[in-house]
Image: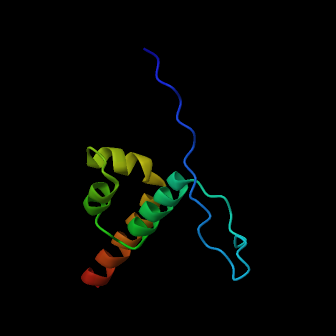
Amino acid sequence: MASRAQPRQRLPRAAESASGRYADLPDVRFHALRHTAATLMLEANVNPRVVQEILGHANIRQTMDTYSHVLPNMQQQAAERMDEMLG
């Protein structure tokens, strides 16, 4: 049995102005917001294991493979901290 492709999920335009019309908000896919949230958490030094659990990834590798673009900044920060500790 072939599975049907799911339509892309989009957030409803929930914010309305006083006139009852929708506010001028971009049409954003839910997945894009999820990806942004995970990237921001990693950039804020939230433990990757915590991010993995929040996202519901089966293992840490899935999280780190998906968000590896954040790693160079994290590695630089770790090197700077080590430098500070060692003087």
Which corner quadrant holds the C terminus?
bottom left
> Quadrant of residue 58 in the image?
top left
Residue 16 in the image: x percent, y percent? 65, 74
Taking depth in this image into account, of 45 and 75 the one nearest to the observer is: 45
Measuring 35% from the left and 50% from the top, which residue is drawn there? 63
Residue 8 in the image: x percent, y percent? 57, 43
Measuring 31% from the left and 83% from the top, which residue is drawn there? 84
Residue 41 appears left or right of 11: left
Residue 13 higher or lower than 83, as above or below? above
Taking depth in this image into account, of 47 and 17 the one nearest to the observer is: 17
Residue 41 appears left or right of 15: left
Taking depth in this image into account, of 87 and 56 the one nearest to the observer is: 56
Residue 46 higher or lower than 5, as above or below? below
Residue 81 appears left or right of 43: left
> Quadrant of residue 37 in the image?
bottom left
Residue furthest front as drawn: 20
The figure's colour scheme reads: rainbow
Taking depth in this image into account, of 37 and 65 the one nearest to the observer is: 37
Residue furthest top as drawn: 1
Measuring 39% from the left and 46% from the top, which residue is drawn there? 65
Residue 53 in the image: x percent, y percent? 26, 56
